[in-house]
Image (cartoon, rainbow, N blue to C red):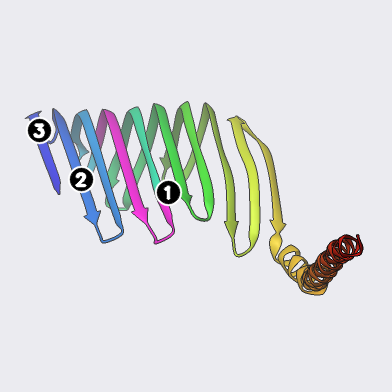
Amino acid sequence: MEEEVKKSVSVGNDNTGASAEAQANTSASGEITNTSISGQVSTTVGTSAEAHAEESTSTEIVPGIEAHAEVGATADASVEVTTEAHGEAGWDGSDVKVEGGASVEARTEVNVEGHASSGIDTPLGDVIAETEVHAGAYAEAHAGVEGHAEVGKHGVDVGGGAMAGAGAGVETGGSVEVAGASTDASVGASVGVQAGVEGSGHATMKGGVASVGVEGKVAVLLGVDADVNVDVDTKPIVKTVDKVNKVVIVPVVTQSKTIVKDGTKQVKKSVKNTTNSAKKTVGNLFSSKKKKKKKK
């Protein structure tokens, strides 16, 4: 969906006049699928104005020779502000991912231009001299934020950043042309600064590789990075553990089970033998007592 509103007004004519215009534009878009949803909104508001003036004159000096002169100037100024915001969320079957951001930019600009020419038209040719000068200046500022997060079976990954800056510049120049020979020159200067921070952290497991880290960036004219990240490939470790399990753990456990089983059999046999021996001893004692009673 997009909507635009524009208003303009003008006075004067092509030679001398002025005009102004203001416009606003808004757009929005979105998408929904089985696994994700996203949207974006942006607006632009701007206004501009200009003024111009042109004058010319000519006169015949003598029959067949004419002199003419033209002079003119224009000036314009504009201001524009743009904002934008976006967001997205989705599910890929294993991880949930959310990200979004917003930004705003503003710029103002002014320009001035002037020109003049004069010449003489003769039956042998024209002799013309022209000059042009211009100057301009601008100022701009911007700010923005971004963020993202991902959570799922592969781990966690989050991050974000913020950035802001401003700049300004000027430029001026001119040219002169006489009888087909010309020269021009211009000079400009600009200054700007931006400052911002961004960072992220993650702890993920993908393809058997465990990754843990943090990273950050500070930008103040020059960029300074500070990153720490550790990746560990767990596949060799898993293979080693698997081999140790097959070569050492499984045989030891199997042997232990055999020892325990055999020991249990021996204990049961020993208990049984001891029980039988005790029964036999007790039986003999009772039998001996009965014989002694009969003798009396």
Nearer the camera: disc 3 or disc 2 = 2
Residue at 61% in and 36% down: 216
Mark 2 or 1 closer to N-term? Answer: 2
Q: Amino acid at mark 2?
A: Ala
Instruction: Give residue 157's position: percent from left, percent from top.
Output: 52, 46
Residue at 44% in and 59% down: 94
Q: Amino acid at mark 3?
A: Ser
Residue range corresponding to the magenta coloring: 67-96
User: What predominant SS class does the magenta segment belong to?
Assistant: strand
Residue at 54% in and 50% down: 155
Q: Are marks 3 and 1 in contact (CB under 8 Å)?
A: no
Instruction: Give residue 247's position: percent from left, percent from top.
Output: 82, 74
Q: Residue 102, located in which quarter of the rendered image?
A: top left
Which label is found at residue 8? 3
Q: Amino acid at mark 1?
A: Gly
Packing grade of label 1 (10 A; few <14, some 14-19, many >=20) is: few
Nearer the camera: disc 2 or disc 1 = 2
Which label is found at residue 236? none
Residue toward you, 5 or 211? 211
Residue at 27% in and 45% down: 40
Cα–Cα gap, marks 3 and 1: 40 Å
Mark 3 or 2 closer to N-term? Answer: 3
Image position of 30 with respect to 163: above or below: below
Residue 89 visible in rendering: yes
Work out which quarter of the rendered image holds the C terminus and state it: bottom right
Cα–Cα gap, marks 3 and 2: 25 Å
